[in-house]
Image (tube, rainbow, N blue to C red):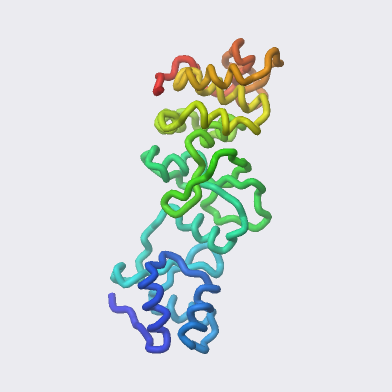
Amino acid sequence: MTRIITKSLSGILEELELNNKSYVTLDELAELARKHEVLTKPSLIASRLKKNGWLLPTQQRGVWEFASASMAGPYSKNDPLMEIKAFQLLNPKIICYVCLQTAAWVMGLADRVPAHAELAFSEIPRRKLPDNITSFKYTPKLEVNVVRGVPCLAPESIVVHIATKPDLVKSWNGVMEWLPDVVYETEIDEFLIEISDKNDSIRRRTGYLLEGMYPDAADAIYNSIEKPYSKIRFGPRKQSIRNDEKWKIADTILPFSTREVEKVK
């Protein structure tokens, strides 16, 4: 498909190509317009680039996907993380991280990314999130690394986040398709760092979850907990499926015993 490159906007398009831009914001267009002495309003520049097939919409107003010349037309790369990247470009001061299965997929530890990308926030933002993003509240202790262009929870943080509120998980059978691969990438010392600022209940649920998959880590967490303690739930407040006396946990949600899960480390 032939796309028009107008003389007035050729410098802006050339720079977007040279910088290998995947996404562009209205502010970036304004900066490029000043640099190339284009007097047209940034919003009108965006409108013309959209009309000619160079910019594609996202759910974030003021952020577009750039369809470079290599795409041979106004075609999206269909990046599953597009709306997360667009949100972050528009809100650089909001701290967030991909989590759960999305984080596992980003790190190559899950076969597929969920239909609704999962994003954890230290504080849930008031502004509306894209429709295909599910938000959670979680603050990691371990350093967050950027993978595939998005900040991603460390493997240990993914596990502790799940243990923080197990009833947030829609399908534990689905989680167990990728969680063992995540646990395989973890280390005991890193778990102890991640739980160091978490409360006793989160620590116990984390250790309970790791009992079969990574018993050495479970033992290290157990030894870091003050005893005795009262019973807590793993899951919502309902009748327990099983009771674990070591961790003093009433499991109300898991369709399996954590002690019978295959050891991965």
- 131 in relation to 191, above or below: below
261 is higher (above) or lower (below) than 74 = above
Q: Quadrant of residue 251?
A: top right
Residue 159 on image: x %, y %: 52, 32
- Name the side, left or right, on which 4 lies relative to 256: left
Q: Is residue 56 above or below residue 265?
A: below
Question: Residue at 55% of width from left, 73% of height from top?
Answer: 27
Residue 256 visible from this viewpoint: no
Q: Is residue 19 left or right of residue 157?
A: left
Residue at the spot x=70%, y=15% of the render? Answer: 229
Residue at image coords 48%, 18%: 216
Given residues 3 and 213, the one toward you in this image is 213
Q: Nearer the viewer, residue 78 or 263?
A: 263
| Residue at far top of view | 245
Residue 263 at what x, y percent from top left?
A: 41, 19
- Spot occupied by residue 158 in the image (x, y as percentages of width and height): 51, 36
Residue 263 seen in the current view:
yes
Position of residue 39 measured from the top left corner of the image (x, y, whole percent): 52, 89
Instruction: Write the residue at 61% across / 25% down.
Output: 203
**25 left or right, relative to 4:** right
Comparing 41 with 94, the one in front is 94
Placement of 99 over or under 48, stated as above or below: above
